[in-house]
């Protein structure tokens, strides 16, 4: 066929293998480092940190696609450095292979600016503090200009415009402005939370989206980034195991979200995103989270660098823990303890504010800072993505007073907090009536400092679960054997499936046996387990096996069973409880620190403080 012509080319002098032009090489490298505007923000921000900046300002337009500009007051570059800044593999941070073992900077490959320069229109202005004049270079799709002298402040500004303007295929992969902005802000927020010494300001399309002063402590930073309601509810975490130290904050379960945007792990000062650490949090909050939710937590983990490998994947911030089991257990326990101390009841004021659709006055007990951006009418309603960046939109003069405490990282002592939610309710262990029950579900009762509404079924579930768990920890569960087993009809396949798991079920006091090819006999159940009933329980267990393919043992099984039962709606509302029964339920609950959410994370109680009531009636 036509190939004959090619064969005759064998003797040709010209090679068909050719080195790629530099622009193409850089664009290929850019494919790995620069995926979207957020990657540009990360690289430029980290360069600013490497340059010793104290203040960083980030300006974004159209989610960063049109413009990312990062300005810093770091050490700057002279004309000789500016000539090389865009060159691939040119870096000031690494000189020899040996340096790789003890790198202290965030960058070292010298790839970022070269990559960015090949896929955008860039400009760098820079002036070292000792110089009187600065210099600027431009890079348009890989064509770098000679440095030009120009006036300006000490430090460096890097401007990146029209990302991917010359690689339309990549540009098509970008998402909506709101999504790209969200990712950019996520990067900025994490780096801001990681560096107490750093002042950060950020704008989007000219509007301010973040404002944190240098020297502001961790909790104050969280307040600026995520708002006062969250910051005020944070519970400090502090634990040590040898030279592994965990500090930071967890938020009560009601702040959990469908994504991990409110989770921050700093490992020896650097933000990391790691599956194991996400799992640590899920485990620490186990039993307090609704399905698919991720808790809010801001944690700093300090450990011997030799016990953790951070360079598993440079771009993904994954880590590998040596001695993972031990560290995992230590972290989970520390989180559980902190969570138990936190106030998990839903504050009534949150509901009042929501009902009134207004922001409370600044300085209120739980001020909601509100989104900084006004909702954009072009954005789809119900789109949750933008809520990540709620930032305080209060006038600047108010902030002075709020952050008036010492600017260190230590949380303010409890007395100076606007309110100490958990502490103020100590007297609620007093469980005498009278109670009002609404809709055979909600128990309303007076407290010395306000009132409380309890979901009797959610609470009952939690109490049952905790009591069963405690009983199981002491020894085998007390099981009530039936004289006449209850028979439950199932399909052949279901009976076979269940048969495999009978011993595991027995370990949690669920005594089933296979009575016939399509019949299960329920021989006994834990004394304390009133609901779901035998038939329902069999269904719940079958559901569980189908969903997860397995049956855990002991406590984990009970937890799953109660959870599935709740999902199937089989633990219903609607029993009429006598005043005595209510009292007894509340008394049992008072002994259980976890009793503020039901085992699958729904709240069990909503509290209205006297102050909330006074505000609702405009007395305050
Ligand atoms: P890397 O950070 O891996 O060295 P980059 O391509 O990000 O590679 O940057 C190349 C070089 O340009 C850096 O090594 C540094 O010397 C210089 N540089 C980049 N950004 C700044 C900045 N904001 N301030 C001072 N120097 C900078
Ligand atoms: Mg860099």
Image (cartoon, rainbow, N blue to C red):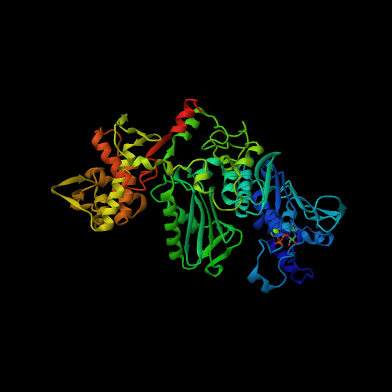
From where the camera sits, is residue 184 visible? yes
Task: Report whether residue 568 is seen.
Answer: no
Instruction: Say which of 77 and 65 sits in front.
Output: 77
Q: Residue furthest left?
A: 483
In the image, residue 532 above or below residue 157? above
Residue 595, image x, y percentages: 35, 45
Which of 234/406 is in front?
406
Left/right placement of residue 226 relative to residue 520 reads right
Q: Quadrant of ligand 2?
A: bottom right
Direction from residue 295 to residue 468 in the image, left or right: left
Residue 532 is situated, as x and y percent measured from the top left of the image, at 26, 43
Q: Residue furthest right?
A: 149
Q: Nearer the viewer, residue 17 or 149?
A: 149
Using the image as rendered, state which of residue 322 and residue 581 is in the foreground.
581
Q: Which image quarter is the N terminus in?
A: bottom right
**Image coords of residue 135 (percent x, y):** 84, 54
Residue reaching furthest to the front: 415
612 versus 471 height, above or below: above
- Residue occupying the point 46% across, 53% down: 281
Task: Give residue 77's position: percent from left, percent from top.
Answer: 79, 59
């Amino acid at each position: 066929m036509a190939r004959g012509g090619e064969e005759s080319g064998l003797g040709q002098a010209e090679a068909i293998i050719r080195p790629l032009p530099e622009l193409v090489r850089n664009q290929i490298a850019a494919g790995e480092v620069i995926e979207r505007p957020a990657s540009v923000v990360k690289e430029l921000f980290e360069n600013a940190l490497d340059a010793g900046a104290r203040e960083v300002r980030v300006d974004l337009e159209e989610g960063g696609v049109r413009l990312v500009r990062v300005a810093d007051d770091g050490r700057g570059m002279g004309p000789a450095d500016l000539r090389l800044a865009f060159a691939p593999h040119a870096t000031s941070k690494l000189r020899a292979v040996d340096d790789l073992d003890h790198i202290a900077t965030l960058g070292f490959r010298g790839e970022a600016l070269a990559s960015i320069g090949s896929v955008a229109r860039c400009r760098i202005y820079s002036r070292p503090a000792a110089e009187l004049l600065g210099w600027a270079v431009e890079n348009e799709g890989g064509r770098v200009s000679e440095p030009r002298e120009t006036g300006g402040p000490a430090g460096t500004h890097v401007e990146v415009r029209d990302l991917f303007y010359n690689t339309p295929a990549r540009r098509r992969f970008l998402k909506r402005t709101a999504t790209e902005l969200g990712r950019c802000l996520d990067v900025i927020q994490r780096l801001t939370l990681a560096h107490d010494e750093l002042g950060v300001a950020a704008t989007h399309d000219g509007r301010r989206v973040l404002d944190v002063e240098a020297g502001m402590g961790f909790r104050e930073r969280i307040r600026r980034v995520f708002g006062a309601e969250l910051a005020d509810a944070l519970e400090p975490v502090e634990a040590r195991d040898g030279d592994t130290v965990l500090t930071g904050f967890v938020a009560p379960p009601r702040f959990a979200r469908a994504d991990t945007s409110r989770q921050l792990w700093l490992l020896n000062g650097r933000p990391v995103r790691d599956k194991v650490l996400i799992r640590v949090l899920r485990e620490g909050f186990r039993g307090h989270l609704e399905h698919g939710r991720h808790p809010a937590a801001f944690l700093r983990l300090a450990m011997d660098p030799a016990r953790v490998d951070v360079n598993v994947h440079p771009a993904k911030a994954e880590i590998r823990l040596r001695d993972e089991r031990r560290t995992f257990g230590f972290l989970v326990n520390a989180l559980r303890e902190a969570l138990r101390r936190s106030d998990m009841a839903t504050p009534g004021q949150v509901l009042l504010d929501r009902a009134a659709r207004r922001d409370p006055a600044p300085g209120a007990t739980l001020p909601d800072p509100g989104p900084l951006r006004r909702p954009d009418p072009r954005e789809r309603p119900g789109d949750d993505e933008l809520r990540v960046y709620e930032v305080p939109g209060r006038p600047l003069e108010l902030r002075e007073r709020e952050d008036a405490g010492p600017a260190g990282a230590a949380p303010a002592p409890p007395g100076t907090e606007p309110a100490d939610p958990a502490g103020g309710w100590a007297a609620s262990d007093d469980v005498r009536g009278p109670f009002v029950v609404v809709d055979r579900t909600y128990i309303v009762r007076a407290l010395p400092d306000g009132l409380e509404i309890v979901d009797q079924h959610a609470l009952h579930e939690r109490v049952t679960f905790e009591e069963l768990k405690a009983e199981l920890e002491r020894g085998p569960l007390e099981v009530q054997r039936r004289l006449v087993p209850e028979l439950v009809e199932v399909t052949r396949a279901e009976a076979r499936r269940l048969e495999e798991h009978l011993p595991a079920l027995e370990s949690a006091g669920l005594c089933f046996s296979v009575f016939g090819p399509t019949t299960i006999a329920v021989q006994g159940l834990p004394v304390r387990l009133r609901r779901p009933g035998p038939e329902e329980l069999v269904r719940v267990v079958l559901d569980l096996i189908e969903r997860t393919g397995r049956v855990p043992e002991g406590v984990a099984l009970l937890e799953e069973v109660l959870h599935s039962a709740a999902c199937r709606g089989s633990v219903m509302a609607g029993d009429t409880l006598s005043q005595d029964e209510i009292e007894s339920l509340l008394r049992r609950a008072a002994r259980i620190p976890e009793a503020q959410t039901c085992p699958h994370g729904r709240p069990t109680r909503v509290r209205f403080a006297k102050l909330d009531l006074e505000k609702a009636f405009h007395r305050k």
